[in-house]
Amino acid sequence: MRTLIIILIFIAGIFQGKSQQLVYKPINPAFGGDTFNYQWLLSSANAQNPYDEKKDYTNLLDRMNSLDSFTQSLNRQILSELSRKLFEDQFGSGSIQPGNYLFGSLYLQVTNTNQGLLINILDTGTGDQSEIVIPK
């Protein structure tokens, strides 16, 4: 019996739990971390910074005055209205019908698919292609 108690005490001693107190230590020196981390954090931040001091960003807004901005806005509105009118003349007031269409150097191929309306756009001048799917 005595040997059994000794063996049980020995086994209980092997499996006794050990733990320690968890302590949080901040890394950033601004929040109480070690001051030796400052240079490492600064170099990491500088490596990720896309801003370049050598470039002159001060006159980006000064390059375009209000008259140039108004002229560009007016040109965009005129071109938008013109393209809307051309689109309405080509397709009518209804929806886009499947078929082939030519707008200057743009060749449009409109087809119905299971996914919806597929519009392939080919710029015959440059050879650039775009594909647009309008879901059902």
Image (tube, rainbow, N blue to C red):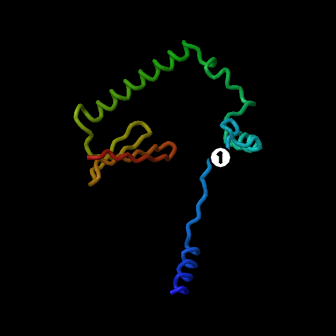
Residue 35 appears at what percent x and percent y?
75, 40
Residue 8 appears at what percent x and percent y?
53, 80
Q: Is residue 3 above or below residue 74?
A: below
- Give the image quarter of residue 61: top right
In front of the other: 82 or 76:
76
Q: Residues within 10 Å of mark 1 (few under 14, many from 20)?
A: few
Q: Is residue 40 above or below residue 104?
A: below
Q: Is residue 51 left or right of residue 3?
A: right
Q: Is residue 29 above or below residue 127?
A: above
- Return the residue at label 1: 25
In front of the other: 124 or 55:
55
- Residue drawn at 42 percent across, 40 percent down: 106
Q: Is residue 83 left or right of residue 72?
A: left
In front of the other: 67 or 111:
67
- Residue drawn at 40 percent across, 26 percent down: 80
Residue 65 appears at what percent x and percent y?
58, 14
Q: Amino acid at mark 1?
A: Lys
- Give the image quarter of residue 13: bottom right
Q: Is residue 56 above or below residue 124?
A: above
- Residue drawn at 29 percent across, 30 percent down: 89
